[in-house]
Amino acid sequence: MGIVEEAHNVRVLGNGERTIVLAHGFGTDQSVWKHLVPHLVEDYRVVLFDNMGAGPTNPDYFDFERYTTLEGYALDLLAILEELHVASCTFVGHSVSAVIGALASISRPDLFSKLVMLSASPRYLNDVDYFGGFEQEELDQLFDAMRSNYKAWVSGFAPLCVGGDLDSVAVQEFSRTLFNIRPDIALSVAQTIFQSDVRRLLGLVTVPCHILQSSKDLAVPVVVSEYLHKNITGNSIVEVMPSEGHLPQLSNPEMVIPVLLRHIRFDIEV
């Protein structure tokens, strides 16, 4: 196992000819794909990894300067693909990782046959003629809450983000992976993600994009999926699912996993 593989806890399952790369979002780790993986390993080579800063990674490897922008994560992704000798893959990215995959595809479109983007947003802040879902004051309050009492913040944020009650398995699972992250790293990652703006780069994305979105998502309004569809240069398609929450693959797998599988297996008709 190479240095990059070890640092990101890379796992390769299955031995199909086509490669699928699964990338998790903020506050989770590769376990967020546990309901999807069993449906893929028979037919695909499945690559799982943890973003740097996620709970299972070594916090000593987290470079606060490198990860002040999403480009640092995109470079990590390209390094993983290179170390695994991946010539082409279907990339499934959740939340920020959907955008990370898009950024990586700009510099190396040959490595991505398509992007499946779940709960993705190019910008979380509202702007003139753009509704991202958050005002700066709301984000500042979120960051202050993380600083002052991380445990209390997780207890409030997890059910809001997942969209379930406190006792739901999905909320408990998201809380667990959030608690696994060192609080100063979690704050740094949250600031990078929520303050990011990659709208100007969407026109450089040329690979096919399958944009999947919950009809009710605290972090990403439905209009954002349409914004991505209109501004990505490559062929794209949008499917808004009647699911609730920002982690529908965890909270509503019986509805969302079949949708993910359909978009993984079938290409956009041109």
Image (spheres, rainbow, N blue to C red):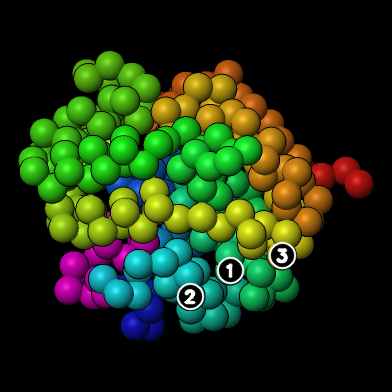
Image coordinates of residue 215 in percent, x first then y, are: 56, 22
Tell me the CA gap for discs 1 and 3.
11 Å
Residue that carries the numbered disc 3 in the rendered image = 204
- Looking at the image, residue 160 sits to the left or right of residue 90; the answer is left
Which span of residues is magenta-colored? 50-63
Q: Badge 2: few (under 14), some or many (20 or more) residues near its Cα, within 10 Å?
A: some
Image location (x, y in percent) of residue 254: 51, 23
Please name the residue that numbered disc 1 is placed on.
Answer: 104
| Dot 2 or dot 1, earlier in sequence | 2
Which mark is first along the chain, 3 or 2?
Answer: 2
Residue 24 horizontal/vertical position (percent): 42, 51
Report whether 185 appears left or right of 130.
left
Q: Assign a secondary structure to mark 1.
A: helix
What's the residue at 12%, 43% (across, down)?
150
Q: Disc 2 and disc 3: Cα gap in Å? A: 17 Å
Q: Is residue 186 shown in magenta?
A: no
Tell me the kind of residue under disc 3: Leu
Q: Residues within 10 Å of mark 3 (few under 14, many from 20)?
A: some
Magenta span: chief secondary structure: loop
**CB within 8 Å, label 1 to label 3:** no
Q: In the displayed structure, would residue 145 be above or below residue 87?
A: above
Kind of residue at badge 1: Ala
Q: Give the residue drawn at x 64%, y 27%.
A: 240
Between disc 1 and disc 3, the foreground one is 3
Classify mark 3: helix, strand or loop.
helix
Q: Which residue in the protein does label 2 denote?
A: 75
Asked whether residue 148 is in view, the answer is: yes
